[in-house]
Image: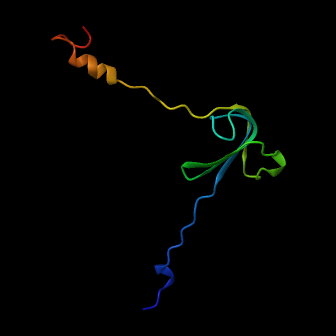
Amino acid sequence: MRATRDDVRVTTAPAPRRWHAEHAWLARGAETSGLARDVLIEAHGERFTAVTPDTSAALVPLDAIRLRGLTLPGLANAHSHAFHRALRGAAAGDSFWT
């Protein structure tokens, strides 16, 4: 049986997204920590794949978006209502609101 053109699926990976931050706050790690200059940030799909400090603007790909000023990492939402659940069980007959 011969494969026809309709039988072949061609998938392409999404193009990487890039940003070049003038200044960026980097997590503490083995190589860098704190404030860094000229940081190239790359992502493929929904994941960040590279964070490279000290990347000269001359070496940054043309499709990179320039981020001026200070760039901070996204902050996780650690908001929780677990204490409400604990209080609800200890209300001694009253409701949470009383």
Q: Farthest residue in the bottom direction?
A: 1
For residue 84, side relative to residue 71 (left or right): left
For residue 87, side relative to residue 25 (left or right): left
Q: Quadrant of the C terminus?
A: top left
Q: Quadrant of the N terminus?
A: bottom left
Residue 13 vertical position relative to residue 48 in the rendered view, above or below: below
Q: Farthest residue in the top direction?
A: 98
For residue 80, side relative to residue 3 (left or right): left
Residue 87 vertical position relative to residue 82 in the rendered view, above or below: above
Picture coordinates of residue 41, whole percent (x, y): 67, 45
Q: Nearer the viewer, residue 19 or 29?
A: 29
Q: Farthest residue in the left direction?
A: 93
Picture coordinates of residue 44, whole percent (x, y): 59, 53
Displayed quadrant of residue 74: top right
Q: How many numbered marks appear?
A: 0
For residue 14, side relative to residue 52 (left or right): left
Residue under the image location 27 percent in, 16 percent down: 87
Q: Farthest residue in the right direction?
A: 58
Displayed quadrant of residue 71: top right
Picture coordinates of residue 77, whole percent (x, y): 47, 30
Residue under the image location 35 percent in, 24 percent down: 81
Picture coordinates of residue 84, whole percent (x, y): 30, 19
Residue 2 vertical position relative to residue 78 in the rendered view, above or below: below
Q: Nearer the viewer, residue 92 or 64?
A: 92
The scheme the figure's colours follow is rainbow
Residue under the image location 68 percent in, 34 percent down: 33
Residue under the image location 26 percent in, 11 percent down: 97
